[in-house]
Image: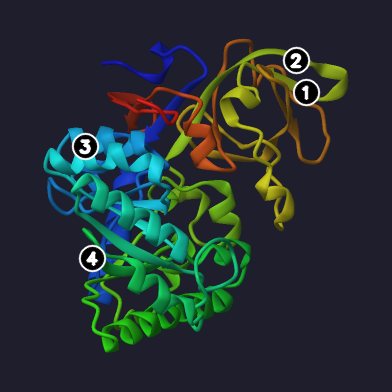
């Protein structure tokens, strides 16, 4: 039997028991709300994890890069939304996937983009399904629900481009630390996108997909009437930032980075590990939350949280673990070579440091290897 003691460090671990519990939780929320779950695959970028999430071999699923679309479609997950605003230069790769049997849908939020996509479809004899992106909370891109330009964009989608839906992302929910605020954000998300769907249907458009999605609002949504699907991503893996919001618990974080103690600075109260910011990422999102975890939370070999410790600093290949109270660290408790597991602030960039996950169960047993992809180009 392979265990974590057989692995090189740093290595990325996925606790399969926690992972599957998180997936079941999201699936149950969507069943209760009467919507389809279209999981976002951008966090883990792994076919093995996607197979645990998707309702059928074909999906549905969400991606954020064309490389993800090609990777997952090549493995048979073909019902995809590419949930980043489209530009014409990316359409040939999408068209190539769709010609091979995929159904990759794109999003846009301007007349300029709609005309460009329509022109490309006309010139290339292509068919492409399109969703209009709606800005429900001022977080990022999209049209406001009451913007008259929504109708102008819809009219500009033609010549092989087909308007099939509307989509929004409550990105502002990532700044909401109270459950009441997240519930209100979820209500607003639903209201915003459903109002646009109803408006466009009234203008004669066949709106079939009404898509919302964020991990915080998924877990807070009380009523999704009028919505057809929910997209969420990081919640299946979990991280300290989500735990700080209350969208999950620390015990729900399935991703950790396995490191070893490689030295200590006794007078400074430091343990030195081989897991620096190249392994953990430089994301310091929890610094703005009630509990700052530095560069990560420290767990023992079996994944049990050691709440008195944190990764207080990091260099490229060195992690620095300190006690939160500043007290000395007992060297007998942390001998050279002791293995520890570090929970990440943000699962997406931490996962991106690795090309595979080691799936673990029962604390230290390695049950498999889950390859993942990275970057943007094939």
Local SS, label 4: strand
In the picture of the structure, the residue carrying the numbered disc 4 is 36
Count neighbours of disc 2 (C-alpha within 10 A) and say few if under 14, some if 14 to 19, many if 20 or more.
some
Q: In this figure, which colouring scheme has been used for the structure?
A: rainbow
Q: Verify CB contact (< 8 Å) between mark 1 and mark 2.
A: yes
Count neighbours of disc 3 (C-alpha within 10 A) and say few if under 14, some if 14 to 19, many if 20 or more.
few
Which image quarter: residue 7? top left
Which image quarter: residue 69? top left
Going from N to C along the chain, the mark reached first, 4 or 1, is 4
In the picture of the structure, the residue carrying the numbered disc 2 is 264
Q: Verify CB contact (< 8 Å) between mark 3 and mark 4.
A: no
Q: CA distance from mark 3 to mark 2?
A: 54 Å
Give 7 or 73, whichever is nearer the viewer.
Answer: 73
- Indicate whether 117 appears above or below 32: above
Local SS, label 2: strand
Q: CA distance from mark 1 to mark 3?
A: 53 Å
Which image quarter: residue 366? top left
- Indicate whether 314 appears above or below 293: above
In the image, what residue occupies the spot 27% across and 42% down? 94
Q: Verify CB contact (< 8 Å) between mark 3 and mark 2.
A: no
- Indicate whether 35 appears above or below 238: below
In the image, what residue occupies the spot 45% across and 72% down? 220
Q: Position of residue 8 (x, y in %)?
A: 46, 11
Going from N to C along the chain, the mark reached first, 1 or 2, is 2
Outermost residue, right direction? 267
Instruction: Assign the C terminus to one quadrant of the image.
Output: top left
Q: Verify CB contact (< 8 Å) between mark 2 and mark 4.
A: no
Q: CA distance from mark 2 to mark 4?
A: 50 Å
In the picture of the structure, the residue carrying the numbered disc 3 is 96
In the picture of the structure, the residue carrying the numbered disc 1 is 270
Local SS, label 3: helix
Going from N to C along the chain, the mark reached first, 3 or 2, is 3
């Amino acid at each position: 039997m392979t265990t974590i003691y057989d692995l090189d460090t740093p290595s990325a671990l996925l606790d399969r028991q926690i992972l599957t519990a998180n997936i079941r939780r999201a699936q149950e929320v969507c069943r209760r709300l009467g919507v389809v779950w279209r999981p976002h695959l951008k966090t883990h970028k792994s076919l093995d994890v996607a197979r645990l999430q998707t309702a059928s071999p074909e999906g549905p699923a969400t991606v954020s890069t064309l490389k993800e679309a090609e990777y997952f479609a090549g493995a048979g997950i073909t019902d995809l939304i590419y949930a980043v605003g489209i530009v014409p230069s990316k359409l040939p790769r999408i068209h190539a996937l769709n010609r091979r049997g995929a159904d990759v849908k794109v999003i846009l939020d301007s007349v300029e983009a709609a005309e460009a996509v329509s022109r490309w479809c006309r010139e290339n004899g292509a068919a492409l399904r399109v969703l209009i992106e709606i800005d429900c909370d001022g977080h990022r891109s999209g049209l406001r629900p009451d913007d008259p330009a929504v109708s102008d964009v819809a009219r500009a989608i033609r010549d092989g481009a087909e308007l099939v839906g509307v989509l929004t992302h409550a990105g502002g929910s990532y700044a909401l630390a109270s459950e009441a605020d997240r519930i209100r954000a979820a209500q607003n998300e639903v209201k915003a996108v459903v109002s646009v769907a109803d408006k466009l249907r009234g203008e004669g458009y066949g709106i079939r997909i009404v898509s919302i999605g964020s991990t915080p609002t998924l877990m807070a949504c009380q009523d999704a009437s009028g919505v057809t699907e929910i997209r969420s991503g990081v919640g299946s893996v979990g991280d300290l930032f989500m735990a700080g919001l209350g969208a999950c618990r620390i015990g729900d974080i399935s991703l950790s980075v396995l490191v070893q103690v490689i030295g200590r600075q006794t007078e400074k109260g430091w343990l030195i590990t081989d897991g620096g910011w190249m392994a953990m990422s430089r994301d310091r999102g929890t610094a703005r939350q009630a509990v700052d975890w530095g560069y990560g939370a420290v767990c023992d070999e079996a994944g049990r949280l050691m709440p008195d410790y944190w990764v207080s600093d990091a260099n490229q290949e060195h992690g620095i673990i300190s006690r939160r109270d500043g007290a000395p660290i007992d060297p007998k408790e942390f001998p050279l070579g002791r293995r520890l597991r570090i929970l990440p602030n943000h699962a997406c960039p931490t996962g991106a440091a690795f090309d595979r996950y080691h799936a673990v169960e029962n604390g230290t047993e390695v049950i498999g290897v889950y390859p993942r992809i990275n970057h943007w180009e094939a």
